[in-house]
Amino acid sequence: MQMDLPQTLHPLPAYLKDLRNVSDDNITERWTVALSEENGVVTPGVIPTTYYINGVAFTGNPMDYQYNMTLGVIQEWTINDFTGGVNHPFHLHVNHFQIISMGRYPEYLGMRVGQWRNTIPLINSNGVIVRFIPDRWSGTLIVHCHMTPHIDLGMMTTVQVIDPNSNEPPPSYPSHRHN
Ligand SMILES: [Cu+2]
């Protein structure tokens, strides 16, 4: 059997623009994420009983969100891992993100700056930076460590994507964790 192989790679979907060189002035929505355990106390050799995202162990209430995003607006998330160095594969639902900085490790498990992923390993890394544009879908989505036992210990949270053009009235959000 003979078949023609493609000579060029398929282009990225239009919504996956290269966001590496976007100037700071054009980034209006930023979120800093801190992963921690046992209220910031790391005890070597001791398995934590609680993990936190920005000081909160997931309550189970999807309305207990931590961050608002606007549909179609560039997001920049800086992720810092203050846990004891276990791999926490940080996972975002719905949208892929582009890796802007890998933090401590320039490359890890084949992941490197410029790639689009929906999960990035955090090995006690600080200053991991990702960017993405929430595309098409608005509503509540979850962000969590992809180690399932860590979700059970609290390492999950929810964020919101708000559609500024929606005719729906905005849901009544709790006011205490708006960014
Ligand atoms: Cu984890």
Image (cartoon, rainbow, N blue to C red):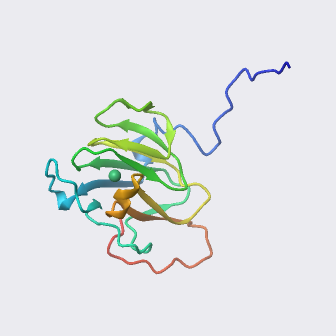
Q: Is residue 53 above or below residue 4?
A: below
Estimate the x, y position of residue 16 in percent, counting from the top left.
Answer: 58, 42
Task: Say which of 54 and 47 sits in front.
Answer: 47
Q: At x 61% / y 71%, what residue is drawn?
A: 166
- Asked if one can make out residue 54 in the rendered structure from this viewpoint, the answer is no
Placement of the C terminus among the 4 image quadrants: bottom left
Residue 104: name its quadrant: top left
Estimate the x, y position of residue 52 in percent, counting from the top left.
Answer: 28, 61
Q: How many marks?
A: 0
Task: Say which of 17 and 153 sits in front.
Answer: 153
Estimate the x, y position of residue 114 in percent, counting from the top left.
Answer: 47, 33
Q: At x 35% / y 68%, what residue is drawn?
A: 58
Viewed as shown, does residue 45 lie left or right of 74?
left
Residue 131: name its quadrant: top left
Q: Is residue 143 above or below residue 175?
A: above
Residue 121: name its quadrant: top left
Placement of the N terminus among the 4 image quadrants: top right
Which residue in the rendered view is the most extreme toward the right? 1
Viewed as shown, does residue 82 lie left or right of 12?
left
Task: Say which of 3 and 67 sits in front.
Answer: 3
Q: Is residue 85 above or below residue 11?
A: below
Q: Is residue 136 above or below residue 131?
A: below
Q: At x 43% / y 58%, what residue is drawn?
A: 143
Q: At x 36% / y 77%, what residue is drawn?
A: 175
Estimate the x, y position of residue 15 in percent, counting from the top left.
Answer: 61, 46
Viewed as shown, does residue 179 lie left or right of 138?
left
- Asked if one can make out residue 51 in the rendered structure from this viewpoint, the answer is yes
